[in-house]
Image (spheres, helix red, strand yellow):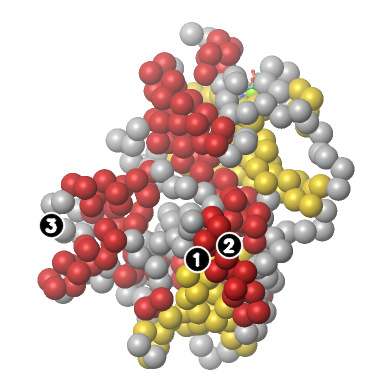
Amino acid sequence: MSEFSLIQKFCRDIGVSHSETQLSIGDDAAVIQIPSGMECAVCVDTMVEGVHFLNDVSAEALGHKILAVNLSDLAAMGALPKWATLALTLPSKDEQWLQAFRQGLHQLATEHGVQLIGGDTTQGPLTLSLQIIGLLPQGSRLTRSGAEIGDDIYVSNTLGDAALALAIMQDRVKTPADESLLDSLRRSLERPEPQCELGVALLDIANACIDLSDGLVGDLAHIASQSQVTMRVDVDQIPLSKPFKTLMAGAASKGDVILIDFALTGGDDYQLAFTANPSRRAEIVDLAKRMSIRLSRIGVVLDQNAQQSKVELHQSGSPIEPSQGSSYQHFQ
Ligand code: ADP
Ligand code: MG
C-alpha cells in the first residue's frame, strides 16, 4: 500500500465535519474559517513508544490517548476543541493496527466534536504527534498566571489511578491480585477522559487553570510561579478513587510503599486543577452536580513565600514533603 492510499484509507473522515472547514485532507494545507468574535487556542503533544507508552498498549487505546492528552490541554485553557492534524511515524504499514488506531481516534473525536483536517505520514520508530485547534471567545481564556491570593484550589474527579496502574504493571508496587481493581486503574491510564466541558464552564468562574499531566505537585508549581503565589494543599482532601483507596489500605498495612505519592506526583491524570475566589463556591458545587463530576476543594492560594517551596503540602495540620520527586521530566 502506498503512502497515498494509506492516507485515503485510514486518515479520512475522522471525527465530525465542521461547516467552517473550507478545505480538509487532500491539499497541501487545510483551510479553516475562524467565526467572528472568536480566537484560536493551538497546542501539540507527542507520544513516543517506550517513553510515553509501553509496546503492549493497544492501537485503539493509543488513538484515544493521543487525542485525549491534547483535548486536556485545550480544556485547561477553556477552549472548545474543533480541528486536529496528525503526524504519524510508523515502523511499518500494519493495516490492522491502523484500523484500530483510527477507531480509537474517531470515537473520541466524534464525542468532542473534533475534525481531523490534515497531517503527515512517515516511516520510523512509532511516534504519534497530534496538533489541536480550539476556539475561545475573543479576549477570554484560562491561564496559569491568574491565581489570586485567597483563592480556593480545586481538582476534578480523582487523582493517582493512572500512575498507580503503571507502577503495578511495571512491578514497582506489589498488590493483592484483584484483576477488577487493576482493570479499573488501567482504564484511567489508557483511556483518560479529558475535561473539555468543565474547562469551557470554568471560563467565567476560575482565575487560573492547568491540566494535570505531570503530577499534581509539579503542575500546581507552574500556577504558583506564573501567578507568583504559594499553593497550600491539604493532602487529606485529595480525591482518590475506590480502587485506589482499597489498594492503599492493603499496601499501608505492609508499610512498603507510600501510595498517596502516586496522587501527588504520579502524572497522567488529565484532570483539571484550578483556582477560584471563595465567593464562587456555591456555583462550583452546582457545576459539579450539573456535570455529575467531582470537584474537590484541596487547598488555598497564599502570598509568595521566598523561604518555602511553591507548593506546600499539609497533612493533619502539619507540613509534609512528597517522598518522590515533584513531577516527571524528560530532560533532567
Ligand atoms: P505533502 O507532501 O504536500 O506534505 P502529503 O502527501 O504528506 O502532502 O499529504 C497529503 C494529504 O494528506 C495532506 O492534505 C495531508 O494533510 C494529509 N495527511 C497526510 N498524512 C496524514 C495523517 N496521518 N492524518 C491526516 N491527514 C494526513
Ligand atoms: Mg508530507
- What's the CA distance linking mark 1 and mark 3? 30 Å
Q: Which residue is mark 3?
A: 176
The answer to whether one can see residue 189 in this image is yes
Rendered image quadrant of residue 221: bottom right
The reply to whether dot 1 and dot 2 touch (C-beta < 8 Å) is yes
Q: Amino acid at mark 1?
A: Leu
For label 1, the SS is: strand
**Residue at the spot 82% in from the left edge and 53% down from the top edge:** 138
In front of the other: label 1 or label 3?
A: 1
Q: Amino acid at mark 2?
A: Leu
Q: Which residue is mark 1?
A: 295
Q: Relative to 71, is 316 on the left or the right?
A: left
Q: Give residue 199's position: percent from left, percent from top.
A: 62, 56
In front of the other: label 1 or label 2?
A: 2
Q: Amino acid at mark 3?
A: Pro
Q: Which mark is residue 174?
A: none
